[in-house]
């Protein structure tokens, strides 16, 4: 049995009852948190001295296209020289299994460095052969990140309905194969990135995608960007807690209520919602209807660094902006917090990035620091000790840098220790990243 004792930290639990605990030690045995109490026995244990630090659940990213990591930095501008959609098809067709592997390892290590212990990976490209999807699974074995890898079917512009229908169905068979192959990988689950539901023949294919995924027990996700899609899903009996939609900006109040009733977790990507002007207001609207909301980084090529803390900071800014605008437009400024209670607290924000993300990944024993929870735990050593007075405010509003994330533990295994990625000892990370970047740049030039 392995035993880790994290001593002396300020514990941000993500628990409703006691969000912050002080002067306690967190004890981990194998992959589980077993106790949080003062004066833990440290004999025979690995001791992590967390004095002056925040101990909290690892962050969970519920919508990340990790396979795009090799092309990061290429689409930082909305109307820049490289078009995102074109590059999506180009790299999807051009990627080798090695490119898939290197990109996912690169994204995994960068997100782990930033405290992300779990990810819902929406792999919507480079899924053409079993070698490609095997390479994705292998990449998660290398990084040791907890992953729900969801495999998508990308429709080339030239594909007929019939061709696409066949590649869609073949992809479900691959998901079933991968689910069998990963049955003993405690940290890896495989599911389906559903096709985007649109009226016409695509709707029939979407229904088939959901039905066939449920037959093999696969969890699902999809890009929810269309008007009325949740209503159609509700009418067709498709809504369920095994589907995690992302964005959902166009959902009506009625549709959001239906998501809440069906236990659907909605993944919101603050950077994407704000910067593409899709409507960051979905966040508050969803919360108001009782939807559990989780957050996500989304697109590695346009976001650097891959920090979920940065997403939390953006989320908080957008929530408070909408709250304040509401109050101002009602003529109630300076704010009166009796008339204008906050829609969302700092503790709610912490939960969005932790326990709600865990639910999105299909766990009911992950995302909090409490006995019996799986041991995905991070230690944040703030550069300024003032942070310890209000750790929730710090992690949500101050965007802790990767250099402040000193320890990352996933399933009881230390993946970052003393500020250093454990995997960095065996992988030449800069060389690997340079290689995948070079390959992608060559694909761009080939066009
Ligand atoms: Zn996306």
Image (cartoon, helix red, strand yellow):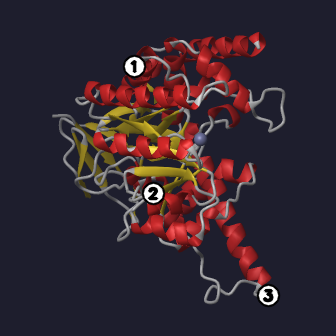
Q: How many marks?
A: 3
Q: Position of residue 431 (x, y in %)?
A: 59, 11
Q: Which mark is residue 134?
A: 1
Marks 3 and 2, how far apart at CA: 34 Å
Quarter occupied by residue 171: top left
- Label 1 neighbourhood size at 10 Å, few (<14), some (14-19), many (20+)? some
Q: Which of labels 3 and 2 is toward the front? A: 2
> Do the residues under discs 1 and 2 have CB atoms within 8 angstroms?
no
Quarter occupied by residue 408: top left
Q: Looking at this rendering, what residue extends furthest in the left direction?
A: 1
Residue ID at (46%, 68%): 258
Which residue is the site of mark 3? 331
Q: Position of residue 416 (x, y in %)?
A: 43, 32
Marks 1 and 2, how far apart at CA: 28 Å
The mark nearer the N terminus, 1 or 2, is 1
Which residue is the site of mark 2? 265
Residue 139 vs 188, above or below: the answer is above
Residue ID at (70%, 31%): 85
Q: Secondary structure at mark 2?
A: strand
Looking at this view, is 437 or 244 the one in front? 244
Q: Which of labels 1 and 3 is toward the front? A: 1
Q: Quadrant of the N terminus?
A: top left
Residue 199 vs 437, above or below: the answer is below
- For residue 68, side relative to residue 333 (left or right): left
Marks 1 and 3, how far apart at CA: 58 Å
Q: Secondary structure at mark 3?
A: loop
- For residue 35, side relative to residue 344 (left or right): left
Residue 223 vs 162, above or below: the answer is below
Looking at this view, is 130 or 61 the one in front? 130
């Amino acid at each position: 049995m392995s035993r880790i004792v994290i001593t002396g930290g300020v514990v941000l639990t993500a628990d409703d009852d006691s969000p912050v605990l002080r002067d306690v030690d967190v004890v981990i045995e194998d992959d589980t948190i077993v106790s949080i109490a003062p004066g833990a026995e440290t004999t025979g244990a690995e001791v992590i001295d967390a004095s002056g630090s925040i101990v909290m659940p690892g962050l969970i990213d519920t919508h990340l296209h990790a396979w795009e990591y090799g092309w990061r930095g290429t689409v930082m501008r909305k109307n820049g020289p490289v078009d995102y959609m074109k590059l999506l098809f180009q790299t999807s067709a051009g990627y080798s299994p090695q490119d898939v592997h290197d990109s996912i390892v690169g994204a995994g290590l960068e997100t782990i460095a930033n405290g992300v212990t779990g990810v819902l990976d929406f792999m919507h490209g480079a899924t053409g052969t079993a070698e490609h999807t095997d390479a994705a699974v292998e990449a998660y074995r290398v990084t040791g990140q907890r992953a729900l890898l969801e495999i998508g079917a990308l429709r080339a512009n030239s594909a007929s309905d019939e061709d696409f229908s066949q590649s869609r169905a073949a992809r479900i068979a691959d998901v079933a194969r991968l689910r069998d192959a990963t049955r003993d990988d405690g940290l890896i689950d495989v599911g389906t990135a559903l096709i985007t539901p649109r009226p016409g023949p695509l709707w029939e294919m979407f229904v088939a995608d959901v039905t066939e995924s449920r037959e093999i027990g696969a969890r699902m996700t999809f890009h929810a960007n269309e008007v009325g899609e949740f209503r159609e899903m509700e009418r067709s009996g498709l809504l369920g807690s095994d589907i995690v939609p992302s964005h959902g900006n166009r959902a009506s109040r009625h549709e959001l209520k239906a998501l809440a009733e069906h236990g659907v977790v909605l993944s919101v990507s603050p950077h994407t919602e704000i910067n593409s002007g899709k409507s960051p207001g979905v966040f508050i609207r969803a919360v108001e209807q009782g939807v559990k909301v989780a957050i996500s980084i989304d697109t590695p090529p346009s976001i650097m660094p891959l920090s979920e803390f940065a997403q939390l900071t953006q989320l908080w800014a957008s929530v408070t902006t909408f709250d304040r605008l509401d109050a101002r437009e009602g003529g109630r400024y300076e704010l009166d917090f009796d008339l204008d209670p906050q829609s969302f607290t700092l503790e709610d924000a912490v939960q969005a990035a932790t326990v709600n993300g865990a639910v999105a990944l299909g766990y009911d024993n992950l995302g909090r620091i409490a006995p019996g929870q799986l041991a995905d735990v991070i230690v944040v050593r703030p550069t300024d000790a003032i942070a310890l007075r209000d750790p929730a405010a710090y992690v949500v509003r101050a965007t802790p840098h990767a250099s402040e994330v000193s320890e990352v533990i996933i399933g009881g295994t230390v993946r970052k220790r003393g500020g250093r990625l454990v995997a960095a000892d065996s992988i030449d990370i800069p060389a690997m990243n340079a290689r995948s970047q070079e390959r992608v740049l060559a694909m761009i030039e080939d066009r």
